[in-house]
Amino acid sequence: MQRRNATRPGENRQIAPRGGNTRGADKMELALPALIISMLIVAGLLARQRSRTRPEQESETPPPKVRPRGRTARVLEKLEPLPEIPTLMDLVRIEIAEEGIDEIPGRDGLPDPVVLKVFRRDEAVRMGCSHNAFEYRLAADVIPEDATEAEVRLVCPICESEGPGT
Ligand SMILES: [Zn+2]
């Protein structure tokens, strides 16, 4: 009798852990959806990462150029003809050709802008000379390619020695 009494509290004691187990089962019931949700999140992240990395791996051909739209496109339309407009150096070359500057002695090696500027600056030399024999004269010890406007003059050797118009 005493044994039964002794076992009963033991049984009672066994019930207590069982109650603990049911509480654990409650936790499992909560943990399972949480696990499923977290697995879904992980799967979603992996899928997103895969879709992100895939184009890079497959993009051996360059990606198509993004055509600007709206205001940007309108601005670019206005800007696109710009490269066809001649540069300042183009204009210099054109004027040099029109004036026949390349035929003037001493011109070789001098920078294009320099010969054009000197040609304009020394207009009086050209106009006051009837010999049509003027030439570019470079200051001493100056390399033609490095010459500046100040180091170059347009002169007529005949005018220099005999005076203009003779
Ligand atoms: Zn002259």
Image (cartoon, helix red, strand yellow):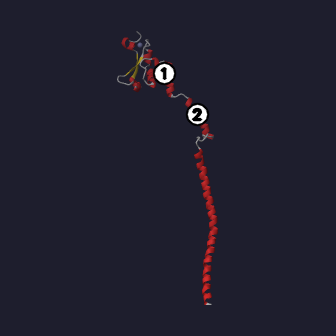
- Quarter placement of the C terminus: top left
Residue nearest the observer in this picture, 37 or 130 = 37
View extreme (bottom): residue: 1
Residue plotted at (58% across, 49% down): 53
Name the residue beneath numbered marker 2: 80
Residue extending farthest to the left is 141
| Ligand 1 is within 8 Å of the C-beta of the residue at disc 2 | no
Label 2 crowding class (10 Å Cα cut-off): few <14, some 14-19, many 20+?
few
Q: Residue furthest top?
A: 166
Location of residue 78 by image quarter: top right
Please state which amino acid type lies under the numbered disc 2: Glu
SS at badge 1: helix
With 155 as the anchor, is 95 left or right in this view? right
Mark 1 Cβ and ligand 1 under 8 Å apart: no
The residues bearing labels 1 and 2 have C-alpha atoms spaced at a distance of 28 Å
Residue 52 picture location, percent across and down: 59, 50
Left or right: where does residue 115 sit relative to residue 84? left
Give me the residue at 60% from left, 83% from top: 10
Crowding at mark 1 (Cα within 10 Å: few <14, some 14-19, many 20+): some
Q: Are marks 1 and 2 in contact (CB under 8 Å)?
A: no
Which disc, if any, is residue 70?
A: none
Q: Residue at x 62, y 53 (%)?
A: 47
Q: Position of residue 63 (x, y in %)?
A: 59, 42
Secondary element type, mark 2: loop
Residue 148 percent location from the top left of the image: 40, 26
Query: Which quadrant: the N terminus?
Result: bottom right
Earlier sequence position, callout 1 versus callout 2: 2
Q: Does 98 appear above or below 53?
A: above
Identity, as a three-letter code, of the amino acid under mark 1: Ile
Disc 1: which residue: 96
Image quadrant, ligand 1: top left
Residue 155, horizontal then vertical, whole percent = 40, 17
